Image (tube, rainbow, N blue to C red):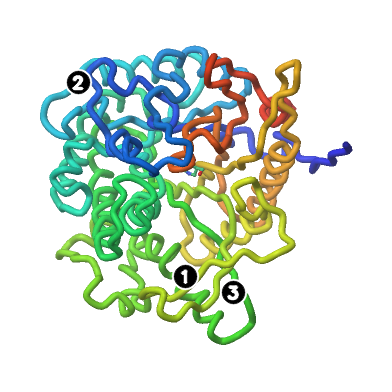
Amino acid sequence: MTDSLPHIRRSDFPADFVWGCSTSSYQIEGAATEDGRGESIWDRFCAGAGHIRDGSSGAVACDHYHRWPEDLDLARSLGVNAYRFSIAWPRVLPQGRGAVNQRGLDFYSRLVDGMLERGLQPWATLYHWDLPQALQEQGGWQQRACVDAFLEYTELVTRALGDRVKHWITHNEPWCSAFLGHHEGNHAPGIRDYAAALQVCHHLLLSHGLALPVIRRNAPGAQAGITLSLHPIEAASHSAADAAAHLRHDGSRNRWFLDPLHGRGYPSDIWALLGAQAPQVLDGDLAAIATPTDFLGVNYYFPEVVEDAPGSGPIATRVVEPAGVERTAFGWQVSPEGMVTLLNRIQRDYGPSRVYLTENGSTYEDQPLPDGSVLDIERRRYLARHLEAAWQARAQGVPLQGYFAWSLLDNFEWAEGYLRRFGLTYVDYPTQRRTLKASGLWYRDFLKS
Ligand code: IFM
């Protein structure tokens, strides 16, 4: 099969462009009960019948807790200069607050040293969804006290690692933590309550803003920001109703985060739809959320096409799946053009000084060949086309300064368990053998170009 790929080269980007790959703690670490780690909401959620499609959990995952030197070697072999990881809050504070688990902190300290020894810039995410279960039992992110707990956790981790980690992300995709976890209920902690999700969302954003000065105090000279999952939105038709739905959907998925982070408060058109479900916002909260960041992290996967859906809830929109478009195995539309559109829109409307694509990737049905190699030509093409899109966005003036592929390894894909593979590296879970896929080999060659 011929497979024409865009002619994009590393040298098309500036020499100081950050090239990385991303992972997260619960999705790869395993060792869920080792060395004093506490229970997380994902451990508890996975134990519930029917929550995870293949009935699995992150208890072992990629066993990265034990195999991290091999994994960092693998990242280095790709030629990336940065590695994005997250810290499991229950590994360092098993009860969420109070007693510190030094063995957990030591693990991350060794991991960071391992990155620096290999010439990999550590990019740490403080919260990639694994809240200590003990905090959930006190109401979790629905309670304002969780913000205080996050600040204590931030203090602890940035004090321990801030001398070496100079890139910090407070939250990964707060939309997912808030709405998948508390409205749709298909992510931990599995709550289905729209008002609760809105309150959680506010507390996540507030904790982000209040954590920034803590990070800056403990990690002098560091860059700090937040990572959002953002989508270019399209209307399903030219009707006035769908055009209005487009605005509302963009308001709830994108502007609900971007506006307050950029000092505009919550978008008034969406707030007006919420009525009694609107979150409780105290004096000073919006100013805290708008604390300036050093960068905006964008996770880009796919555009959303929406139609008007009266009666479906306050936002009254529905995501539709138009026929005839290219999709990944997850059904997500493949649209590198959408990424260019999104990045330009963010720049035009909000003007962040630096943008990093902190995740971008795809899932396909990988089948190892008899010799063990994995010829994932669709993922290879996805990657090459999105790198070309990153180049186009830069050429159009977007201050895009880095790209992180999701993900270094196949891993635990949340409610999908191990049924979805996003890795540049194939993980054979029974043996934990890692094999770079064709996409990983292509990224390596690209990075050497
Ligand atoms: O695996 C997730 C990751 O944890 C957050 N961003 C999207 C990825 C793919 O679904």
Identify the residue position indicated by label 2 in the image. 101
Which residue extends farthest left? 98
Identify the residue position indicated by label 3 in the image. 235
State the image coordinates of residue 415 (x, y, percent, origin top left). 44, 43
Q: Is any part of residue 77 visible from this angle? A: yes
Q: Label 3 vs label 2: CA separation?
A: 49 Å
Element class at badge 1:
helix
Q: Amino acid at mark 1?
A: His
Q: Is any part of residue 290 visible from this angle? A: no
Q: Earlier in the sequence, mark 1 or mark 2?
A: 2
Residue at position x 57%, y 40% in the image: 403
**Which label sits on residue 249?**
1
Q: Earlier in the sequence, mark 3 or mark 2?
A: 2
Would you say the residues marked 3 and 2 are in contact, meaning their CB atoms lie under 8 Å apart? Answer: no
Element class at badge 3:
strand
Say which of 247 and 399 sits in front: 247
Residue at position x 36%, y 72% in the image: 267
Residue at position x 51%, y 44% in the image: 356
